[in-house]
Structure formats: structure tokens, C-alpha cells
Image: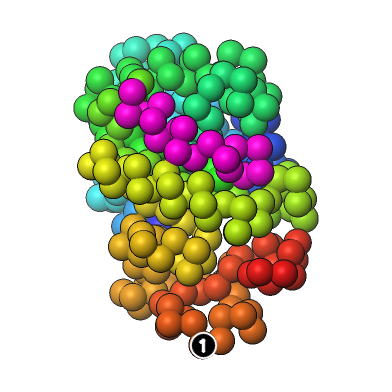
Amino acid sequence: MALHLPINAECNIQCVFCSSAGRNGDFSVAKLLKDIDADTTGHVQVSGGDPLLRAPAELLEILAHCKKKRKVVELQTNAVLVKQYDPARFKLIAKLTDFFNVNFSAHTAELDFAVTGAPDGFVRRVESVKYMVSLGTPVRLTYIVCKPNVAHCADFVDFVARELPGVAWVQFSYVKGMGRAKGNDSIIPRFEEAAGPLNKAMDRLKQLGLKYEVDHIPPCFVREHLDCHVDYRKMRAAMPGIHLAEKQKTAECDGCSLREHCPGPRRDYVEVYGGLHT
């Protein structure tokens, strides 16, 4: 459970799977601080757009208020702007952040461009992540599993192990059928298509001794990695949350041994493919 707190709608890259495309709302500091005060989860996900595009003084005010209220602060960013930030200011951001969550969904510059549309985004993101790791704040890399990159999950693991030592953990997050991906079968892969590459990647992470998680794919497709499945863990702990509203069991779930601890596939996946295996 966490408070998802978008603080702007602007972004400097154009991911094909962007779930926040078209987002709007009241992003005033007063409204955001009020939302933080009302939070009962204790965990605030500061996101956007990209929050590093927010005025630095305002971003620092928001983060400082989170810490004043004793929240766990997760800063979600594509990290492209990190090295352009004033170093002293970014170090303040790092001190007010419990962990960075970096959208990093490719292992090569070519694939990164196909996914994000940012010509130099890959090189800048690599440099930024290395810098962020050096500051001592934990860095999580989130690989959004979508049709353009689904075959390369294991390649990404090898890239991280080789080029980005010190990263705290990797999360494979199955693409949401929202924003640019809504109803789009050229962006949303079938679960059967993703299961092989995902399991291979997580087998490799386990072999390397690196922490990992997986989310938004039903646990029946990743049975050897249930302890690292976010929704499965939440269901076993009887935690309420949006994971229950976003997903639904289908007739194919009947009789499954994991049914009790699985919320089912995402509703937006079922809208595209009709069910788990159809």
C-alpha cells in the first residue's frame, strides 16, 4: 500500500507504454501537502510526469514535508535529468528520499530509443544511475515489460549485473493497459509470450544473488518466483489496495491452486485479450 502522488504531468521522454499520458489535475503545492497529510499508508510514491521537471524548490518542499510526516519516500523518475541537476540540490533530494525508482526498460541504446523516443536517453540514464548509486540512496530499476522489450528481460539482467553494480533491486512490472498502451496489442504482450523471458530473467537474478520483484502478471505464469510476486505477497498478507480493483479473476482461474492469493489478470489486459489464455 502506498499513496501514489503525481506532482506534475510533464515528461521529457515519450515511452510507448506511458500510463500517465493525458494525466491532469491539481498539482499545487498546497494540494499535494494536504494529500500527504491525509495519507494513512506511510509510503508516498512521488511521481509525474517526471518529478525532476518540477521547480527544484517545490520538489524539495514536497519531499521535506513527506519526511516531516515520517513517510517512506519513493521518488519515481526516468533519471534522464539527474546529471543536469545542480549537484548540491540533487544531494538534498537524495537525502530526503528513501529510494529512487528508475524507469529503465531497455538494455541497449537502440531498444531504449524504440521504447522511450529519447535519442540520448540511454547513455544519460546509465550515467545518472551510477551517480545515484554513488550517493548511497537505494536505487530500484523498474523494467516495464511490453511487446518491444519482452524478449530481452534476461539480457537486461546481464546488462545490470555487468554495468550497474550497486543497484538495490530490479522489478519487472507488466505493462498497464492505460494511457498510450490502452487497448493496444502492439504494446501489451500476451502472458504466454512474456512468461518464458520473465522466468529466465528471474532465474538469472536468483543465480546472481540480486534482489528482484515481479508485478501485474498473474502468479500462475511465474510459479517458481511466488515469493517475489508483489500481488501474491499482498494477497497472502490480506492487504487491501488498488491491486484488487485493477484486476479480476476469470473463468480460467477456477480450480487454480493459487486462486486464493491471486487477484487475477488486469482488467485492461482482459479488455484486449478476453482472458488469460484466449
Q: Amino acid at mark 1?
A: Gly
Instruction: Give above or below for 137 relative to 24.
Output: above
Task: Name the residue rendered at 33%, 75% in the picture.
Answer: 236
Task: Name the residue rendered at 66%, 37% in the picture.
Answer: 148
From the viewer's perspective, tell me whether residue 268 is left or right of residue 207: right
Q: Quadrant of residue 18?
A: top right
Whether residue 3 is visible, yes or no, is no
Q: Position of residue 153 (x, y in %)?
A: 49, 40
From the viewer's perspective, tell me whether residue 53 is left or right of residue 223: right
Closer-to-camera residue (218/89):
218
Task: Name the residue rendered at 38%, 30% in the picture.
Answer: 158
Closer-to-camera residue (87/162):
162
Q: Which residue is mark 1?
A: 255
Image quadrant in which the C terminus is located: bottom right
Q: Secondary structure at mark 1?
A: loop
From the viewer's perspective, tell me whether residue 180 is left or right of residue 193: right
Image quadrant in which the N terminus is located: bottom left
From the viewer's perspective, tell me whether residue 66 is left or right of residue 24: left
Q: Position of residue 127 (x, y in %)?
A: 41, 15
By secondary structure, the bulk of the magenta-drawn segment is best described as helix
- Residue density around tag 1, few if under 14, some if 14–19, many if 20 or more, within 10 Å: few
Q: Which residues are magenta?
A: 146-162
Whether residue 189 is visible, yes or no, is yes
Residue 211: in magenta span: no
Closer-to-camera residue (194/11):
194
Q: Position of residue 40 (x, y in %)?
A: 36, 64
Task: Name the residue rendered at 42%, 44% in the picture.
Answer: 201
